[in-house]
Amino acid sequence: MKTPLFAKPAGAVPARHACRFLLATLLCSGLALSGCTRFEPDAAKNSAQSTLKQPSLPGQTCSPARPQTGLVGLLDETLAKTKEAKAWPVSKSDRCKHQFPYHFTVISVSPVLVIGTPLTSPAEANCVSGNASIHCLRSERFAGRYEVADTFTHASGLVWFSPEHGPRLFDIPQHAKSMYLLINGKSLRLKRKGNQWVFAHKR
């Protein structure tokens, strides 16, 4: 009786069964890996599509400016045509509007004359007149207000504009004591008394 060179251990899997087991294991692993490679691009694609379908945030799309009438519409339209207005900062509360960098005071209505005082703090943008409902006019195209008054405080960098004088901001000389303006055939005079400018008269 011949003795085998190698003894077969108890519970060992036959060779043909081991090959089948190994082949099945490789096949399952391949399917699992293939499933992963398909999932990752699909997940990224679905995430991108979900992002694109999200609603736009308020203020991202701005509607064209509507035609305006009245004094506020006239002032807004004049300022919108100036080259300076295009460089004004965008409002933080309304991304579709530019913020006034001036406190605008309407000194005269006929003819229209507006004085701009540079803002040094947000509080200076508010109207200081007693009856705000009458003397404080909210701009429709810009973030800011127009105050109707016959005086304004002297400051460095004052400007003036008039719709009847074209869409342009004019500088007021720093050391000026009075100003004579001819607008639409009418003569206007502004006089400085200490730290205050007053509307003297018109002819």
Image (tube, helix red, strand yellow):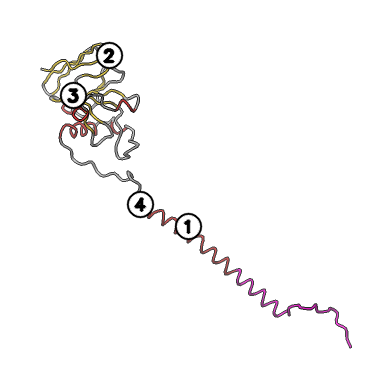
Among the two numbered marks 4 and 1 on one chain, the one whose residue lies closer to the N terminus: 1
Judged from the image, the secondary structure of the residue bearing numbered disc 4 is loop
Q: In this view, does 167 lie to the left or right of 34?
A: left
Please name the amino acid that badge 1 sits on: Ala
Please name the amino acid that badge 2 sits on: Asn
Residue located beneath label 4 in the image: 55
Among the two numbered marks 1 and 3 on one chain, the one whose residue lies closer to the N terminus: 1
**What segment is highlighted magenta in the picture?**
1-29
Among the two numbered marks 2 and 4 on one chain, the one whose residue lies closer to the N terminus: 4
Judged from the image, the secondary structure of the residue bearing numbered disc 1 is helix
Residue 67 in which image quadrant: top left
Q: Distance between the residues labelled 2 and 3?
A: 20 Å
The image position of residue 122, as x and y in percent, is 34, 28
The image position of residue 176, as x and y in percent, is 25, 13
Residue located beneath label 2 in the image: 195
Q: Distance between the residues labelled 4 and 1?
A: 19 Å
Q: Tell me, yes or no, whether the highlighted magenta stretch contains residue 189.
A: no
Among the two numbered marks 3 and 4 on one chain, the one whose residue lies closer to the N terminus: 4
> Are circles 2 and 1 on residues that touch, CB within 8 Å?
no
What crowding class fits label 1: few (fewer than 14 Cα within 10 Å), some (14-19), or many (20 or more)?
few
Q: In this view, does 64 lie to the left or right of 123?
A: left
* Residue drawn at (63%, 71%) of the image: 26
* Residue drawn at (55%, 66%) of the image: 34
Residue located beneath label 1 in the image: 44
Please name the amino acid that badge 3 sits on: Leu
Q: In this view, does 101 lie to the left or right of 181?
A: right
Residue located beneath label 3 in the image: 113
Which mark's residue is nearer the viewer, 4 or 1? Answer: 4
